[in-house]
Image (cartoon, rainbow, N blue to C red):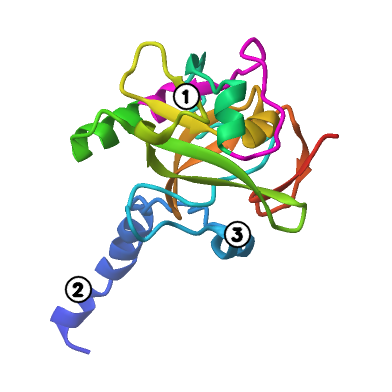
């Protein structure tokens, strides 16, 4: 072995020790959506920001824990004559009991949609329809307040325009619930949470059971 090679050998242990002492890169844990969430999430193809099926879990937490629930203001409600003209045999909800809540994020998103569409009459329609493994599910889409004589019209008190339309049958099933806008890995969407009229729901958070 040459003299030059013998002099370089003691350097290897020191280089290995220096390499071992270097800080290791941090690892990050990523929370992926469950298979049920991916299977049950559906979005509207006509408008990229309007979801057709919203989360239905009565106990689902808000995406932003600092987002307060605000009592929405009832702007207008249908009369008995309007309900008769609509040819629907339904019991109207008394205006004193017609109540929903809305989060700041949902109201801000509605105002952003109205600004983007340049239409102050645009509204979010919330409906309850039959379906799913527990009997009911929410349907949420965009509409206009121009044809809302037979609906209940709500709005956030301080963030406008933030119009929300609910028909009498659906309102009887979501009185006191909260409209929220949440952002998740699978996308952003409006959703209904904390519905006092819901007895429970399925694990995917879409279908729910009503209290009767």
| Front residue (pair 8, 93) | 93
Residue 164 location, x and y as percent? 45, 29
Q: Secondary structure at mark 1?
A: strand
The residue mark sitting in front, 3 or 1, is: 1
Q: Secondary structure at mark 2?
A: helix
| Marks 3 and 1 close (CB-CB < 8 Å) | no
Q: Secondary structure at mark 3?
A: loop
Q: Residues within 10 Å of mark 2 (few under 14, many from 20)?
A: few
Q: Earlier in the sequence, mark 2 or mark 1?
A: 2
The residue mark sitting in front, 3 or 2, is: 3
Question: Is 143 covered by the magenta stretch?
Answer: no
| Front residue (pair 28, 123) | 123
Q: Residues within 10 Å of mark 3 (few under 14, many from 20)?
A: few
Q: Residue at x 39, y 47 (%)?
A: 50
Residue 69 location, x and y as percent? 52, 18
Specify the segment rendered in magenta: 87-107
Position of residue 70 in the picture relative to residue 104 (left or right): right
| Marks 2 and 1 close (CB-CB < 8 Å) | no
Majority secondary structure in the magenta region: loop
Which quadrant of the figure contains the C terminus?
top right
Position of residue 101 in the picture relative to residue 161 (left or right): right
Report the residue marked by disc 2: 7
Q: Residue at x 58, y 58 (%)?
A: 37
């Amino acid at each position: 072995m040459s003299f030059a090679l013998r002099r370089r050998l003691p350097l290897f242990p020191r280089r290995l020790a220096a390499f071992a002492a270097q800080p290791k890169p941090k690892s990050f844990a990523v929370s992926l959506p469950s298979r049920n969430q991916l299977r049950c999430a559906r979005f509207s193809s006509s408008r990229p920001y309007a979801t057709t099926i919203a989360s239905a879990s009565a106990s689902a937490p808000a995406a932003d824990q600092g987002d307060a629930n605000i009592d929405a203001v009832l702007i207008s409600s249908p009369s008995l004559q309007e309900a008769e003209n609509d040819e629907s045999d339904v019991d109207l909800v008394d205006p004193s009991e017609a109540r929903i809540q809305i989060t700041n994020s949902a109201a801000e998103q509605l105002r952003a949609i109205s600004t983007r569409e340049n239409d102050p009459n645009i509204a979010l329609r919330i409906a309850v329809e039959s379906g799913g493994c527990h009997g009911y599910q929410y349907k949420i889409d965009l509409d206009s307040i121009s044809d809302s004589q037979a609906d209940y019209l709500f709005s956030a008190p301080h963030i406008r325009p933030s119009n929300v339309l609910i028909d009498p049958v659906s309102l009887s099933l979501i009185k006191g619930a909260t409209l929220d806008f949440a952002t998740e890995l699978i996308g952003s969407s409006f959703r209904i949470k904390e519905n006092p009229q819901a007895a429970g729901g399925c694990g995917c958070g879409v279908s729910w059971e009503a209290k009767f």
